Image (cartoon, helix red, strand yellow):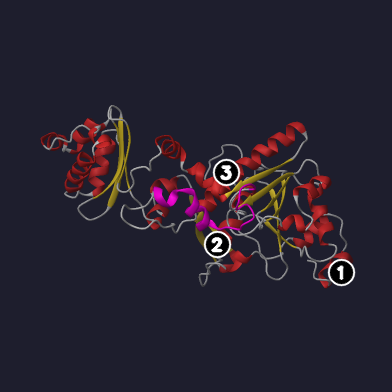
Amino acid sequence: MVERPGALDGVKVVTCSQAQAGTVPYMLMAMMGAEVIKIEAPGAGDPSRVYFDIPGFPNSYFETNNRGVNSFTLNLKKPGAKEILYELVKDADVFGQNFRPGAMERAGAGYEDLKKVNPRIVYVSISAYGPKGPHAQLPGTDFIGQALGGITEAFSTPGQPLKAGVVSVADETCAILTYGAILTGLYYAKVTGVGQKIDCSLLGGQIRLMGHVFNTTMWKQENPIIGQARIEGSAEQPRLACSFLDKNGKPFVIQVNYLQWKNAMTAVGIYDTLEEKGVANLGDAVVSEEKRKLLLQTLNEFFATDTRDNLVETLRKADIFSAPVSTLLEASNDPDVIANECVTWVDYPKYGKKLKVHGSPWIFSETPAKLDIAPELGEHTVPILKRHGYSDAQIKELRDREVI
């Protein structure tokens, strides 16, 4: 079988990126055929190579974020290292970094430095807070992004302290937005021949993730209703998105608007009860806290008398949005997740087995994503140097001086 080129075949990326937000954009590019050269410190590499070790398995954190990239060791603090970096950047399309603000400039690898080497370069910088503002120089992590950006409130429980979640929402949101920004920069550079600097941040990604709820909060100057239900809209055109527990304590969700409300409640057989209690009008729940509490109490008691599978099936047959609330393990075995290859199996020869991993988030008809594994530290240093004209003797000398 002839392997088809990826959509980004021919695109060359050089990154000095680590952890998650700074690596995932380039892992996604590698999946689509780009050559990604990841610069790592000799001997140590990306610090995340030792995160989340599971005996008998690759490092989960590093593997998830670096599949398909090329590892190139280079100590930028050593004499001659900067010249090697410039050589790599000369014919590159993208350069990415997510070090503490100012670090790459001090190393001679800031945007102003690299655009002299390659005016077409799309230079991508990821930070915690963004390049402006009082905290622009501070470093940050996923938890910092979650804490600042509003998601801690969006998924909080009334009466309980706000807290960040176990899934790296800030990192992943920033990474996916960065991926889109890179492609935009690439298109502009291709059309005009002019590169540019692109700044992305954990905080900026979280603000975008809040979507219309953020605008509504700003316009109304009041925080949204949080907890079990998301009740929005007006008394005339209300919307409800809510989670419930079935008779076995299994959670599921339902989402309806004012046009679907009566049909949904009739389908499961509770509309008459809602009328008897005076809460059949969903719009009342928007304007009255008392009616909202009574409505949710009535629905909670009713849905706790049946099974989740039966309730979800009944609602779906009535063309109402409904689904079980999955744990991470349940999501990994969801039939739609598997059918669309959002998870798949990849061979790991070093460990003598195939492992279930993230698949592709997209389905391309002509340029399918290529799923690979993360590289060993420095695995591609020598072949890349040889491709750039370095001899065996020069490579030995660089290694002896611990430049690579």
Residue 1 visible somewhere in the drawing: no
Quick check: is 149 in the magenta stretch?
yes
* Position of residue 201 measured from the top left corner of the image (x, y, whole percent): 59, 48
Q: Is 289 located above or below residue 260 in the figure? A: below
* Position of residue 348 measured from the top left corner of the image (x, y, whole percent): 57, 63
Residue under label 1, please give it.
397
- Along the horizontal axis of the image, is 231 left or right of 363? left
- Along the horizontal axis of the image, is 106 left or right of 215? right
Looking at the rendered structure, the secondary structure element under dot 2 is: helix
For marks 2 and 1, give the CA distance: 33 Å
Residue 155 visible somewhere in the drawing: yes
For marks 1 and 3, give the CA distance: 41 Å
Residue under label 2, please give it.
61
Looking at the rendered structure, the secondary structure element under dot 3 is: helix
Residue drawn at (59%, 45%) of the image: 369
Bounds of the magenta segment: 131-154
- Label located before the other in sequence (1 or 3): 3
Looking at the rendered structure, the secondary structure element under dot 1 is: helix
Residue under label 3, please give it.
177
